[in-house]
């Protein structure tokens, strides 16, 4: 069995190493793929089926039934925006489906405020060798496959 | 066990008296401290940190998805 992880946003998929934050670029919390979002207001969607185990305006984690957890971080250091410009469509603890809208935000406005809008999508605390089918250096839509995690 | 980890991280940050603020952010603890020289990076890693980034009195301790739990355990110790 493996879990297909889909892109939470439309944009350009890129190696995680390009993210301007060592926590992500050095895969300190796990491997994954980054997506540089297209501009304009848009909804970020759940990357997998599961439970919304952590939910902040700027980031969320969906935990799958078999113990995997996928982190979506909307921009870098965006915790400092304190939720301004982010609208939640779900609550912590909700069961969600891959592709379900979780947060509406505007990457263009995030960049205008001086932050990177790149979205790390990370398989928390799994080994790099447990990921496969990585999509990198390609344009993706929200809901398109990004990578697969062994389970 | 988890509380031991919180205690070890707190000690490595220079102890209770050195903490101004600790805020969890998904995978890391963002810590504001009084005296940056009291931070023991090696001890933080021994305590389970995946990484430590320090700029003066601001220390980010990367602990993984249990950051929220560890932060509240540390708050309990303060």
Image (tube, coloured by chain):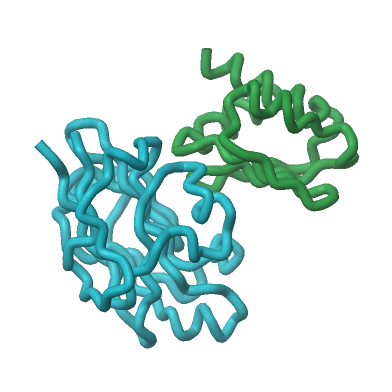
Chain colours: A cyan, B green
Return the residue found at the far left: A1
| Residue B27 percent across, percent down from the top left | 50, 43
Using the image as rendered, state which of residue B50 and residue B16 is in the foreground: B50
Give the answer, above or below, for where B65 lies relative to A32: above
Residue at 82% of width from left, 28% of height from top?
B14
Res. B5 image quadrant: top right
Quadrant of the image for the N terminus of chain A? top left
Q: Is residue B16 visible?
A: yes
Quadrant of the image for the C terminus of chain A? top left
Using the image as rendered, state which of residue A84 and residue A151 is in the foreground: A151
Decide if residue B74 is on the left or right side of residue A35. right
| Residue A82 percent across, percent down from the top left | 56, 64
Give the answer, above or below, for where A103 lies relative to A3: below
| Residue A31 percent across, percent down from the top left | 39, 47
Res. A38 image quadrant: bottom left
Decide if residue B54 is on the left or right side of residue A91. right
Residue at 38% of width from left, 41% of height from top?
A124
Res. A112 image quadrant: bottom right
Number of callouts: 0
Using the image as rendered, state which of residue A28 and residue B75 is in the foreground: A28
Decide if residue A92 is on the left or right side of residue A86. left
| Residue A13 percent across, percent down from the top left | 32, 70
Q: Is residue A47 visible?
A: no
Residue at 70% of width from left, 46% of height from top?
B53
Residue at 54% of width from left, 48% of height from top?
B25
Give the answer, above or below, for where B23 lies relative to A6: above
């Amino acid at each position: 069995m493996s879990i297909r992880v889909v892109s939470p946003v439309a944009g350009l998929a890129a190696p995680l190493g390009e993210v301007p934050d060592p926590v992500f670029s050095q895969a300190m919390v796990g491997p994954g793929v980054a997506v540089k979002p297209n501009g304009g207001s848009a909804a970020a969607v759940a990357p997998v089926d599961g439970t919304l185990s952590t939910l902040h305006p700027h980031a969320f984690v969906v935990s799958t039934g078999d113990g995997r957890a996928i982190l979506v971080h909307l921009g870098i250091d965006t915790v400092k925006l304190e939720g301004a410009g982010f609208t939640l469509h779900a609550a912590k603890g909700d069961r969600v489906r891959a592709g379900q809208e979780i947060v509406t935000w505007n990457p263009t406005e995030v960049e205008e405020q001086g932050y990177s809008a790149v979205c790390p999508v990370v398989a928390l605390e799994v080994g790099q060798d447990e990921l496969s089918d990585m999509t990198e250096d390609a344009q993706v839509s929200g809901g398109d496959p990004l990578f697969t995690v062994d389970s | 066990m988890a509380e031991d980890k919180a205690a070890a991280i707190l000690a490595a940050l220079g102890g209770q008296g050195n903490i101004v603020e600790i805020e969890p952010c998904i995978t890391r603890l963002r810590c504001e401290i009084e005296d940056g020289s009291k931070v023991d990076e090696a001890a933080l890693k021994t305590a389970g940190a995946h990484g430590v980034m320090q700029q003066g009195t601001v220390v980010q301790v990367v602990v993984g998805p249990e950051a929220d739990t560890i932060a509240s355990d540390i708050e309990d110790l303060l």
